[in-house]
């Protein structure tokens, strides 16, 4: 789970490494160094892509199993209802609710949890890298995010109201 975002984080570093190696005109092995850095970069990106693919596959499989379990439990609960329940409720409504609601739960849990973990991991890794470069600049950047996070929803709501008026 950590390797997927890590593959994305090495991109700026390797762009800098490749540019620095290309600027080193006095080095007779400049082309070899550039090629070696590009190969390393490609390996990091490939490993990151494979890790992201495996992450999506594992979460997809887990979500399918959760959905199957929820459907089975809901179906068992419906089957145990009294006969009067089935007289008052249409069978199509029951099937629709079992199918639709469990699919909604399955998709919501799978996508939300997966994205939360992935973005949380990415943010933590970015903060670690930023603190390694410069603590004070990182603190200033974090302090600048706070007003944006507070003003952003106000701007969005004002903009939404203004577009609804016209």
Image: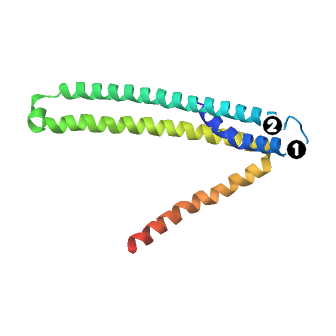
Residue 54's spot in the image, x, y percent?
52, 27
Residue 127's spot in the image, x, y percent?
69, 43
Q: Residue at x 36, y 37 (%)?
A: 105
**Residue 25, numbered circle:** 1
Q: Secondary structure at mark 2?
A: helix
| In the image: residue 4, left or right of residue 22 | left
Q: CA distance from mark 2 to mark 1?
A: 10 Å
Quadrant location of the N terminus in the rendered image: top right
- What is the crowding at mark 2: few (fewer than 14 residues within 10 Å), some, or many (at least 20)? some
Q: Residue at x 17, y 39 (%)?
A: 93
Residue 150's spot in the image, x, y percent?
58, 59
The residue pinned by badge 2 equals 31
Quadrant location of the C terminus in the rendered image: bottom left
- What is the crowding at mark 1: few (fewer than 14 residues within 10 Å), some, or many (at least 20)? few
| In the image: residue 133, left or right of residue 69 | right
Q: Residue at x 68, y 57 (%)?
A: 144
Q: Foreground: 83 or 25?
A: 25
Seen as rendered, the residue at the extreme right is 26
**Residue 117, numbered circle:** none
Seen as rendered, the residue at the extreme bottom is 166
Q: Foreground: 11 or 140?
A: 11
């Amino acid at each position: 789970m950590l390797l997927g975002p890590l593959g994305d984080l090495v991109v700026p570093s390797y762009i800098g490494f490749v540019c620095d190696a290309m600027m080193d005109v006095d080095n007779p092995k400049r082309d070899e160094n550039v090629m070696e850095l590009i190969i390393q970069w490609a390996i990091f990106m490939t490993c990151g892509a494979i890790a992201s693919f495996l992450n999506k596959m594992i979460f997809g499989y887990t979500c399918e199993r959760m959905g199957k379990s929820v459907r089975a439990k809901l179906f068992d609960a419906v089957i145990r209802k009294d006969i009067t329940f089935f007289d008052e409720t249409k069978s199509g409504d029951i099937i629709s609710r079992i199918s639709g609601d469990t699919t909604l739960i399955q998709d919501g849990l799978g996508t939300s949890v997966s994205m939360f973990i992935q973005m949380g991991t990415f943010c933590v890794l970015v903060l670690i890298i930023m603190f390694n470069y410069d603590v004070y600049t990182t603190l200033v950047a974090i302090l600048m995010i706070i007003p944006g996070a507070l003003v952003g929803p106000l701007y969005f709501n004002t903009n939404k109201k203004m577009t609804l008026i016209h």
